[in-house]
Image (cartoon, coloured by chain):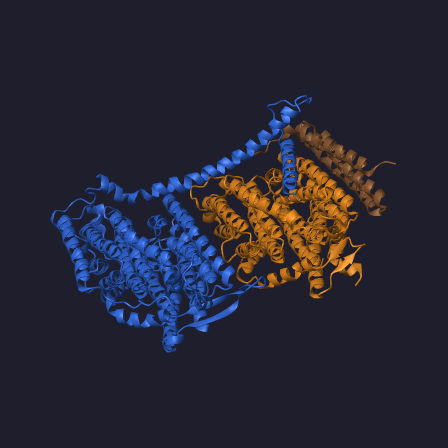
Chain colours: A orange, B blue, C brown
């Protein structure tokens, strides 16, 4: 099997974004042509992923062991396609004036896909940068002056964290003499201080992208200041990219010394779950609220890594999907309310249940999925994480998960309460605007959320096959 | 399988069709359609119950897995159903009483502009409740449990124009979530320990176990769920506030079906209660406490629905008392009788409220028996039943619970329950006399009062028949439930027996005396509705022993404070970090101490995190 | 002969100086330069070890770091300029409006 055909999804995306650039050149300003190209490209990428998946290929190492194409990377491709496609759809109206919007989204998606395949330090670094660079531009693209500020903050802190990451990678390289993940474990005894320092710094770099406390400070500001569609992409796509590279990096490179990072990540997960959900309780701006709740969810995801077991890996991979679906669904509603203009606060939701009952009902579904109420995908995901924590004999993490869920529930209750409030202010739904693209996203999100809650078996099988990489050191 | 699926799915189908096509439906159709589907469900339930009764006694249950819900990571959990005499009884009550209440709602909600939405919620509720009862394992039960909570939340908040309704809905949601989490934790413990959560699987394992702390904890967590749903102390306050919903909702959800889910769960888990004797005793003790607590709180209420709400809490206490002491059949029998008479009481109250154009204050009622004869006499039957006057239905079931409590060696709990029975008789007759007898206290309301239309009176009268003669089903229920409680170890005294004759005389005597006191006070002397409610004990009881206030201070306020505190702590930590930086780098060219640069502070806090990680590593090695 | 440890120590000093620069300077341009310094410290470590191990991977990485840094400069300067256009300020503290 040649490299071309095993990396078909990546090539499809790469080709799409090049064609989309040509599309920008030939079409007049603010046309939907680039978005259409981007959308078709993600659908093509999904098709290519599904095709590769159905062939049951053996894992392949490409480019001198720097990329590993296996079910894991294909599952990541699948998630990233959903994130990218939904982002293009959500920005269909609001981001019309930025012709380059779909191109940048696809480029960032390519970085996430690279992270899914990455098997050595070079591709790790490149993946992180390809993911981040377009996002800096996207974050700064808001018409509002706050947008520039968000982009600047994200950029400065991102460059800072990349510096930390790079220095960590350099130390790991120095301690082990190799760039390939799988060589680290055997290269040198894990007690080497240089390796330990390198691991810590590299972890900080990745945890920054995943928004783990105390590396989370950028999240609320950047989420608030970015355009809605971009925020949903960051909340879903960036988390996917960071979580999967963290898992593969540790599972390939440091599986012999889980004590060096497992408990540490466990403590960070605990801290993140509690702090993220607690602070979410006090937010009134919806995007900030989702920022903090995303931090809390990053803590939940980290459980799956911290327990260092194949069950944990599966649980984490599974949880990404319901979380992401709830994110894109919730942001679809937010874009309907904000119409690309204003920052949506809880007060803007007032009277939604009364005036737009269907949108309100869907919003409830997504909130309940975030909160982990049964019959939504979020519940099944949390159940698996709980199971992973208990099977790994980490009751502390299980308790943290429950407490965090509880606090999160309180946070999600507030927007719901506002929706049912009757004495709504006049401007609450003034900018209400719906287009077909948002409806497509909503349908996908709600069908996925409920489907995962009622009949998760197909996705569970996918996740199980994806996590097989865990045994292939 | 087939019949069971249809019972559950028909109401769901109704909820979806009404929800989607309510714009296209003629105004009257949603109510008829919803009632029809529940009615069909009821007929299929009867057929299934008959099928069940033909099975051999030692194998009298239907179970099966439909498709996996959780699979692949470990032991699978399926969508499993389980129909045995116990769930069958619940099934019949839910669909039967549910259908009557649907029909009644057609009349009650006649003028409401949103009645399509109402019926869609109501059908959804029936679906969720059936799912809960027919679940074959604890996880499916939990799903039904949560959906029931959601339906109840929607229906309490149905009149979301009222702020109090929204607040009540929120309170119900929070307290029920506490319960959901309890069940989730309990079932997770069982799952991790025994790799199954299905009833037959677990119960077969329980048969070979001896009591231990593990079982106590598991049973307690599951009991927390039951506590929340069945309004047991300390998670009881939501039920009283839940009366903000339309009255038929109170009848269906907050009296006849949903709130008894906790009783169902505890009765269903009788093999677990054998292994957790302390929790079983706790169930009984809290149940007994609830009987007297709620009964005393009901005495000074002025709102007709509040009185009924407290009486529901009190009667739930009896059911839990029966289940807790091991008299499972008695508890379940009381559930069944309670479903009849309490649904009737609520529907009757609904007719009164309907007739008085929304008035709920008993202070403005009185003398209605002349205007509403059908409602009055049905209501009287239910009042006699709930007060435990023979030969009405409540007498048999309450005697069964109290008698068994005494027989099984809990004389103190028996005394509490018996005294509460006396109080019950007092506050129910107070309600009855104040509403239907005496002089009309508000002439204009009285003038416009009228008997409810036939579509509302017919369900009330049917329930009246059951409330009057239901007690004679006692032997049938005993035989019907016996196979369930003999299948596994843990329910040696499940069957109903009466206590010594003097206990019966004592309880009934108290009830009769209470009746005469009420008669003397409210008919002879026409005491005012709010008499003595301003005295110290009166106010204490009127405010339900101030438990709501205590709750607010113990649970709600601290959480808000913690959230704010963490927020401030985060700012504070940032400021501290910045402060340290300022001290260290004071010579820096442009470091004005009062200005705070957010980005730089973020970078600083990251570096502090890096430092902490490195320190952590150094300490470990 | 230069010992590898000396080079790594130099890189560590560069890294620290860069990190401190990001943390305590207020001009986004200077902050950005400081973080570039951190990147270059890492590149230096890569090159030093590559020479030590006679391994080309480290050298490749150094080139990639340079290339990525160039892309980062392009984007970063564009963002800084656009913010300056909107606010006519170049003080990261004064620019900051979002908090909470």
Tell me if A392 is positioned left or right of B559 in this view: right
Q: Position of residue B186 (x, y in %)?
A: 46, 57
Query: Taking A338 as reference, is A395 above or below it?
Result: below
Q: Position of residue A352 (x, y in %)?
A: 48, 47
Foreground residue among B200 and B253: B200
Tell me if A102 is positioned left or right of A300 in this view: right
Q: Position of residue B426 (x, y in %)?
A: 19, 52
> Which residue is rendered at x = 67% and y = 60% of the image?
A468
> Which residue is rendered at x = 73% and y = 61% of the image?
A59
Residue B6 visible from this viewpoint: no
> Which residue is rendered at x = 75% and y = 32% of the image?
C13
Number of numbered discs overlaid on the protein picture: 0
The C terminus of chain B sits in image quarter: top right
Q: Quadrant of residue B455?
A: bottom left
Query: Taking B409 as reference, is A293 above or below it?
Result: above
Give the residue furthest to the front.
Answer: B621
Give the residue furthest to the right.
Answer: C1
Q: Position of residue B290 (x, y in %)?
A: 30, 52
Tell me if B583 is positioned left or right of B249 in this view: right
Residue B256 visible from this viewpoint: yes
Foreground residue among C100 and B476: B476
């Amino acid at each position: 099997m040649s490299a071309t055909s095993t990396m078909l999804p990546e090539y499809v995306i790469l080709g799409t974004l090049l064609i989309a650039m040509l599309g920008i050149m030939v079409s007049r300003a603010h046309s939907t042509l680039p978005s259409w190209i981007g959308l078709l490209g993600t659908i093509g990428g999904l098709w290519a992923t599904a095709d590769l998946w159905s062939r049951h290929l053996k894992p392949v190492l490409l480019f001198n062991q720097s990329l590993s194409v296996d079910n894991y990377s294909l599952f990541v491709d699948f998630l990233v396609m959903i994130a990218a496609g939904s982002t293009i759809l959500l920005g269909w109206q609001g981001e019309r004036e930025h012709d380059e919007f779909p191109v940048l989204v696809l480029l960032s998606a390519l970085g996430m896909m690279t992270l899914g395949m990455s098997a050595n330090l070079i591709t790790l670094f490149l993946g992180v940068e390809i993911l981040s660079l377009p996002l800096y531009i996207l974050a700064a693209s808001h018409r509002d002056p706050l947008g520039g500020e968000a982009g600047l903050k994200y950029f400065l802190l991102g460059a800072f964290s990349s510096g930390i990451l790079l220095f960590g990678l350099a130390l790991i390289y120095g301690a082990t003499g190799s760039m390939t993940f799988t060589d680290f474990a055997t290269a040198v005894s894990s007690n080497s201080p240089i390796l330990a320092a390198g691991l810590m710094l590299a972890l900080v770099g990745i945890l920054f992208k995943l928004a783990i406390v105390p590396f989370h400070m950028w999240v609320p500001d950047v989420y608030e200041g970015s355009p809605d569609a971009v925020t949903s992409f960051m909340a879903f796509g960036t988390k996917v990219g960071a979580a999967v590279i963290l898992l593969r990096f540790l599972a390939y490179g440091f599986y012999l010394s889980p004590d060096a990072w497992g408990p540490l990540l466990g403590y960070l997960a605990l801290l993140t779950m509690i702090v993220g959900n607690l602070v979410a309780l006090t937010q009134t701006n919806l995007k900030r609220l989702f920022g903090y709740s995303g931090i809390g969810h990053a803590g939940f995801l980290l459980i799956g890594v911290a327990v260092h077991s194949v069950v944990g890996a599966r649980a984490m991979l599974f949880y990404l999907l319901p979380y992401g679906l709830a994110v894109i669904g919730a942001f679809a509603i937010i874009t309907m309310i904000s119409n690309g203009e204003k920052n949506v606060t809880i007060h803007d939701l007032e009277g939604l249940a009364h005036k737009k009952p269907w949108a309100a009902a869907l919003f409830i579904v997504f909130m309940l999925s975030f909160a982990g109420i049964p019959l939504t995908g979020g519940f099944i995901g949390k159940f698996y994480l709980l199971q992973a924590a208990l099977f790994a004999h980490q009751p502390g993490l299980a308790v943290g998960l429950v407490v965090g869920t509880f606090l999160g529930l309180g946070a999600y209750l507030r927007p719901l309460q506002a929706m049912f409030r009757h004495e709504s202010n006049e401007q609450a739904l003034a900018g209400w605007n719906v287009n077909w693209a948002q409806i497509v996203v909503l349908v996908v999100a709600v069908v996925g959320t409920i489907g995962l809650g009622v009949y998760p078996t197909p996705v569970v099988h996918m996740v199980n096959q994806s996590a097989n990489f865990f045994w292939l050191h | 399988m087939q019949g069971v699926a249809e019972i559950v799915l028909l109401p769901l189908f109704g909820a979806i069709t009404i929800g989607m096509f309510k714009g296209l439906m003629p105004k009257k159709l949603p109510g008829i359609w919803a009632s029809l589907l529940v009615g069909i469900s009821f007929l299929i339930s009867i057929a299934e119950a008959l099928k069940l009764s033909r099975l051999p006694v030692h194998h009298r249950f239907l179970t099966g897995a439909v498709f996996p819900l959780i699979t692949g990571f470990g032991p699978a959990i399926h969508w499993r159903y389980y129909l045995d005499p116990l769930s069958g009884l619940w099934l019949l009550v839910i669909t039967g009483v549910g259908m009557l209440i649907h029909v009644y709602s057609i009349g009650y909600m006649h003028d409401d502009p949103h009645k399509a939405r109402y019926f869609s919620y109501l059908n959804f509720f029936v679906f969720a409740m059936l799912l809960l009862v027919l679940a074959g394992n604890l996880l499916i039960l939990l799903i039904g449990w949560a959906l029931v909570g959601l339906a109840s939340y929607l229906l309490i908040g149905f009149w979301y124009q009222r702020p109090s309704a929204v607040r009540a809905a929120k309170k119900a949601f929070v307290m029920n979530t506490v319960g959901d989490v309890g069940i989730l934790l309990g079932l997770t413990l069982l799952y991790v320990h025994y790799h199954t959560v299905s009833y037959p699987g677990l119960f077969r394992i329980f048969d070979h176990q001896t009591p231990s702390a593990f079982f106590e904890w598991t049973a307690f967590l599951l009991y927390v769920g039951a506590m929340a749903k069945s309004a047991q102390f300390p998670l009881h306050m939501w039920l009283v506030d839940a009366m903000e919903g339309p009255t038929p909702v109170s009848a269906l959800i907050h009296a006849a079906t949903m709130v008894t889910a906790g009783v169902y769960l505890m009765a269903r888990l009788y093999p677990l209660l054998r292994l957790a004797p302390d929790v079983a005793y706790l169930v009984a003790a809290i149940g007994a406490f609830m009987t007297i607590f709620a009964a005393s709180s009901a005495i000074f209420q002025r709102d007709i629905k509040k009185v009924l709400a407290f009486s529901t809490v009190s009667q739930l206490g009896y059911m839990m008392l029966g289940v807790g002491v091991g008299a499972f059949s008695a508890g379940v029998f009381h559930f069944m009788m309670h479903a009849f008479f309490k649904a009737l009481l609520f529907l009757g109250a609904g007719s009164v409220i309907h007739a008085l154009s929304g008035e709920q204050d008993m202070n403005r009622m009185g003398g209605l028996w002349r205007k509403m004869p059908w409602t009055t006499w049905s209501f009287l039957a239910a009042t006699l039943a709930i007060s435990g006057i023979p030969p009405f239905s409540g007498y048999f079931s309450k005697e069964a619970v109290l008698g068994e409590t005494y027989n099984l060696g809990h004389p103190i709990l028996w005394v509490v329950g018996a005294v509460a029975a006396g109080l019950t008789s007092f506050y129910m007759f107070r309600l009855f006399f104040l509403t239907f007898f005496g002089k009309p206290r508000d002439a204009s309301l009285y003038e416009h009062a009228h008997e409810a239309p036939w579509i509302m009176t017919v369900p009330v009268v049917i329930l009246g028949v059951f409330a009057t003669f239901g007690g004679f089903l006692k032997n049938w229920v005993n035989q019907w439930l016996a196979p369930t409680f003999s299948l596994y170890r843990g329910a040696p005294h499940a069957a109903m027996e009466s206590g010594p004759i003097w206990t019966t005389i004592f309880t009934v005597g108290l009830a009769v005396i209470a009746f005469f006191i009420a008669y003397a006070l409210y008919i002879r002397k026409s005491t005012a509705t709010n008499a003595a409610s301003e005295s110290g004990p009166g106010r204490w009881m009127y405010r339900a022993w101030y438990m709501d206030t205590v709750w607010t201070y113990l649970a709600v306020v601290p959480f808000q404070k913690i959230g704010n505190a963490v927020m401030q702590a985060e700012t504070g930590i940032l400021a501290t970090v910045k402060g340290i930086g300022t001290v260290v780098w004071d010579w820096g060219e442009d470091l004005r101490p009062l200005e705070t640069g957010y980005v730089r502070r973020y970078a600083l806090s990251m570096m502090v995190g890096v430092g902490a990680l490195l320190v952590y590593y150094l300490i470990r090695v | 002969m230069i010992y590898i440890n000396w080079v790594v120590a130099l890189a560590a000093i560069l890294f620290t100086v860069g990190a401190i620069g990001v943390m305590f300077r207020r001009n986004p341009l200077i902050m950005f330069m400081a973080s570039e310094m951190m990147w270059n410290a890492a590149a230096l470590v890569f090159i030093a070890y590559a020479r030590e191990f006679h391994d080309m991977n480290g050298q490749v990485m150094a080139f990639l770091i340079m290339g990525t840094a160039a892309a980062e400069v392009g984007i970063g300067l564009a963002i800084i300029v656009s913010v300056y256009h909107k606010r006519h300020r170049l003080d990261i503290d004064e620019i900051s409006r979002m908090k909470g």
